[in-house]
Image (cartoon, coloured by chain):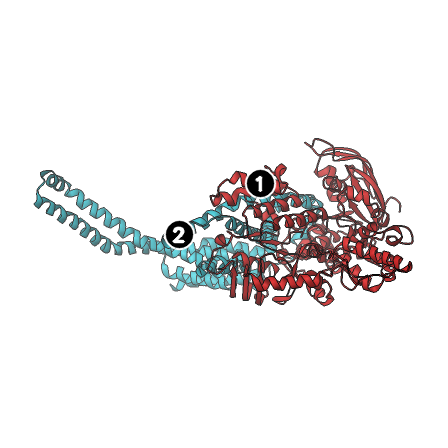
Amino acid sequence: MKYVDALTDISVADIKVDLMRTAYDNEDALLNSFDPRVVLLWTVLFMIIPWLFYDTLPLAILLAAAFVLAALSQVSKYLLALLLFGQVTNVGFFVVLVPLIGGTIRAVGHLGENAGRVVAGVMAGDASVFAETGTIVAAAVGRGIHTATTSQEVGIDAVGALVPFFLKLTIISVISLAVFSAMSPQKLSKGMLRLGVPRQLTFAIAYGYRMMPLLVEEYHALINSFRLRSKVPEKQGLFRWRYFYYLLTLSVKAFYPLIFNVAKRARVTVEAMETKGFSRSLGDEQSQTLRTEGMMVRTRDVTFVFGSLLFVAAVWVFT
Amino acid sequence: MSSNNIVVENLTFQYPGGNEAVLRDASVTIEPGEFTAVVGGNGSGKTTLCKTFNGLIPHFFEGTFDGRVTVAGTDTRESDVAELSKTVGYVFQDFENQLVQETVRDDVEFAPLNYGLDDYAERATRALETLGLDHLEDRFIWELSGGQQHLVALAGVLAMDPEFIFVDEPAAQLDPRNARETYEQLRRLNEKQDKTVIVIEHHSEFIADYCDEMVLVSDGGVAWKEPVEVGLNRLDDLLAHDIHPPQVTQIADGLPTEVGTLPSGRYPVTVDEAATAFQPAATRGSRAAVDGGAVATGTDAAELTERERDGDAVVTMRDVGHGYPTLREGYNRVLDGLDLELYEGDRVALVGANGSGKSTLLRLITGLASPDRGTVTVLGRDTSETLPEQLADDTVYIHQNPEEMFVEDTVRKDVAYYLENRDAPNVDERVDEILAYLDLEHLADRDGRLMSLGQQRRASLGIGLATDPTVVLLDEPTGSLDLQSRREVTGMLRKAESRVETVVVASHDLQLVAAWANRVLVMGEGEVLADAPPEAVFSDPNLLAATDLRQPQVVELSRRLGLKSPALSTESMCETLARSFEDDALADGGVADVSPGGESSGGTR
């Protein structure tokens, strides 16, 4: 069962480290070197820009650019792969689904048209009619398959119409992945604080980042606890689906104890926050000023925003 | 300045919704510059008492509050938690949850920033430098070891430059070495920076080594406050509150008065004092007889090899290599070319420095991890070819943190979980039997996660034993226990032996190792450095240094007294010293009939 271990043990460790790197190791990330407010505004801007394009080519170029940005921001390859897998299967789904439905409708339609003759034949109990019924069914299947193959083109056309839409969604997803994995939470909350987001929320973001790895570890430990005390299904079924279904059940069950443990931690945290003067700081001007000082919009921030806008303009003009 | 102290006067406090007062007419004064230990049994109210110092009581927990607490001249009722926290810094027992920012520097700066202090950066730098953490300032909190996290929590407190530093049970959540490191730092703060340090502590050996005053909290009141040497000599009081005196004090108590006491007439409380007090007895006795009582070494070792020759190994590891990827240091190889066989009847203690692969080894046996190289065979099954669920038929792994073992909402359901999943017959009866066996009946319907650590540990052992295992693997069973609970764990291990064939315990706790194991594996550099009975390991100072662990007081004392082989328990040390004293008395009387090392009964059992 080596391949199961490869799935559940080694790759879990690898994926964990890769995700940690995405979320936490952002010293060299390009986007992290800019002023956080600029990056936040830039993100909002680029959430809108893809919707101004309607053709596949410029969108594809923008997507390529987004991927370059993601690479510079050290986004986890697993996350990107997951995202791409989602989008590609979505598109593929249409290629399969459209002809399938088309073919079925056609075949059922043919059967329906000839239903009277079939029923009459069966009632008469005539052997020759049985043969005819067979011909009708065969014809129905034939027409269905024919429609399916021809409407594959229809399907592809339908997909073609959807491609720009998927491209837009993918661009936005990749950009937000890049931004949020590249910016360190300190910078992010600093920027948001200056832009007027309440302190409670920015603290929650920073706290979330702090606790996340802990929760991942704890979740993994809980699943392992469950595994050591559960029984695997004796019959594993086709493609071992029963086994994977069992693992899936465990991974859902492990959430309850996890949430309970989080609540328990929070009790101490709240007390500790009080001794660290958190509630006192909420209305404190001086504390707010100290927290957001040292931010500066420099030439390179401006260059980045205008450079990227210029790039978009170029795509607009030349395609 | 006389007002620069903490004064508690006739304090009575009851939590909202509580049935009775937790503190009853408690009075105590903490003078500036003290290093004070607060001791008391579970539920005696010591944590509640200490939470009145920084105003968490009555401002955060609003209960019925009678009496007065004055901190540096301020009545705590007239101030608030944030204000008082500038004077009284608090490190929680659950310090991990006290760290709320993601990097070390951010967390240390957090409080000064909240108070709007302009020099927050310098304060953080100073605090980090004081504790020698400056090289870690950009690290993420979750990357740090438990010991480092504790120091960061302490640095966060120091950044506010409080006059009083309060630490709740530093030794409870840390391994002994890190706890000692924390205490060294606290001593430095106490001596160099004139901070007043208050700790809640169960481990009397730390109290003896570091503190100068001790307060006994009993039944909601303060029973007494005494200098440590006096306090630790009140053995009856301590034992009545589940506090175990230092090993050397217990030894002294077991000896005739003229042998056991210091010239001043009291029992020694540190190894230094004990070495002075017992030296005459040890040197007066004839050398041959002065032996730590570990003569059984030879037989034990012979027994071991014989067993190895006979039976089939329960667990076999061949040329095992294992490691894991890390964020900063690439691939970390923990085990490298490890060969090992474990047999029926083995009581194995895995010792070694942090990161030497103790936990990894246990996880490899459970099958939760597969070796990158080599093979691990458990009861004839190759773990790489077997699912952990199947290996769990015969093997049980008891997690370092018992909380991770509780998946249901009552202890009873948790113990039954394995049996019900495997459609075992008579589940209820077997669960009842386990609950009775481990004295868990009164806790059966409680949620495991809400019990005390000692109770949790006991319940987690119950969960393990319910599986009727052949091999039991325990990760740090005394990692965070007070001594009372440690005694319970040792007792349970002995009980478990009648049911299981092989027990493997990964531990930092050499007292447990000395008292329980019959085979010690010293881990280091990716392999087994030594595989020997405990007596052999404890008489090899180089080996002990490799484990990075501190030897139990009896072993250290044996060395200081020049005993040929170390004593492993207080009883055998008492016996040895008493015997040598008697021998000497006999020798004085002209009868010198002593067979060398003769009747020692082997204090290892």
Q: Residue at x 66, y 45 (%)?
A: B454
Question: Which type of secondary structure does the marked residue at label 2 adopt?
Answer: loop
Q: In front here: A52 or B446?
A: B446
Residue at mark 2 to residue at mark 1: CA–CA distance:
34 Å
Q: Residue at x 20, y 54 (%)?
A: A146
Q: In front here: B551 or A242?
A: B551
Q: Pinpoint the chain carrying mark 2.
A: A
Question: Which type of secondary structure does the marked residue at label 1 adopt?
Answer: helix
**Chain the render paints red:** B
Give the residue type that dot 2 points to.
Gln
| Residue B555, percent from left and from top | 76, 59
| Residue B163, percent from left and from top | 80, 49
| Residue B93 horizontal side relative to residue A112, left or right | right
Q: In the drawing, what numbered circle is on residue B535?
A: none
Give the residue type that dot 1 points to.
Glu
Q: Residue A167 sits in which quadrant?
A: bottom left
Q: In the drawing, what numbered circle is on residue B433?
A: 1
| Residue B468, percent from left and from top | 54, 48
Q: Pinpoint the chain carrying mark 1.
A: B
| Residue B528 horizontal side relative to residue B186, left or right | left
Q: Which residue is mark 2?
A: A236
Colour chain A is painted in: cyan
Residue B548 shows in this picture: no
Near mark 2 (Cα within 10 A), the count class, few <14, some 14-19 or many ≥20, is some
| Residue A187 horizontal side relative to residue A124, left or right | right
Q: Quadrant of the C terminus of chain B?
A: bottom right
Q: Residue at x 55, y 64 (%)?
A: B317
